[in-house]
Image (spheres, grey):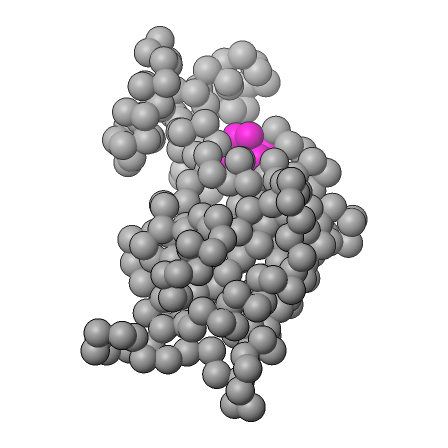
Amino acid sequence: MIIDYLTIFPEIFPAVLGSSILGRADNKGIVEYHLHDIRDYASDKHRTVDDKPFGGEPGMVMTIEPLDSALQSLDIKSGEDSIIILTDAGGKPFNQEIAKSLADKSRLIFVCGRYKGVDERIKELYDIMPISIGDYVISGGELAALVITEAVVRLLPGVIGDIESAERDSHYNDLLASPVYSRPSEYKGLRVPEVLLSGNHAKIEEWRKEKSLFRTKEIRQDLYNRYLKKGNFNK
């Protein structure tokens, strides 16, 4: 997979992309990361990428020309299994289902929004998918792009040694994960549930499913309802 980032702050990315799972994916040749400074595509000597919005609204808007030029420079080929993602507070809420669909692509292109957003016309020039990572506002889309990258890359074959571990994560199948424990088996009078120490794998799996359903129903009723709507009525 190739992942491109169009940003005015490329210096944000290297430390995260070079570390942990994301760094290992790059070292293994599973993913290639490419940073593109949008300011390099500005037409004036000051490398201007923003301007005041029409209509007198306060704040600034990322202008269309540098964005268009930056996207054109990527030479996105017709028929290429790629997708352009705009990190946008007004976008579609990101979830595990979207992460799985993005993991099937061969190329992800992130346009990292800033200021009040990007000139709306860029969405008419290109087939762009706006994505939001939550119902809150941060200063720019760089961190959002990295969050989405982490969620997607860890699903690619060969990135995580034990893919079953990823499949047991919260949200993978619309459920929160069951509680987890490690050594020691007792700490300050608190014991690990006996079933997890029993070695009975069938009982352990039954316990995990039960706790996963209970947690989801108690904490995220919306996820639980979605899980049931998908036909899991006997669970």
Q: Position of residue 112 (x, y in %)?
A: 48, 63
Q: What's the residue at 78%, 49% (across, down)?
A: 29
Q: Indicate the quadrant where residue 183 lies.
A: top right
Viewer-nearest residue: 188 or 223: 223
Q: Position of residue 65 (x, y in %)?
A: 49, 72
Instruction: Please give the range of residues in magenta.
Output: 165-170
Left or right? Give the position of 98 relative to 11.
left
Number of labels in the image equals 0
Residue reaching furthest to the left: 56
Q: What's the residue at 36%, 45% (across, down)?
A: 93
Which quarter of the rendering shows the C terminus? Answer: top left
Q: Is residue 64 above or below residue 48?
A: above
Q: Position of residue 154 (x, y in %)?
A: 61, 43
Does residue 141 show up? no
Does residue 95 show up? yes
Left or right? Give the position of 223 relative to 203.
left
Residue reaching furthest to the right: 28
Q: Position of residue 233 (x, y in %)?
A: 33, 11
**Is residue 86 inside the magenta stretch?**
no
Viewer-nearest residue: 42 or 231: 42
Q: What's the residue at 47%, 56% (across, down)?
A: 125
Q: What's the residue at 30%, 58% (across, down)?
A: 136
Left or right? Give the position of 227 relative to 196.
left
Left or right? Give the position of 4 relative to 227.
right
Q: Is residue 104 above or below residue 146?
A: above
Residue reaching furthest to the top: 234
Viewer-nearest residue: 168 or 199: 168
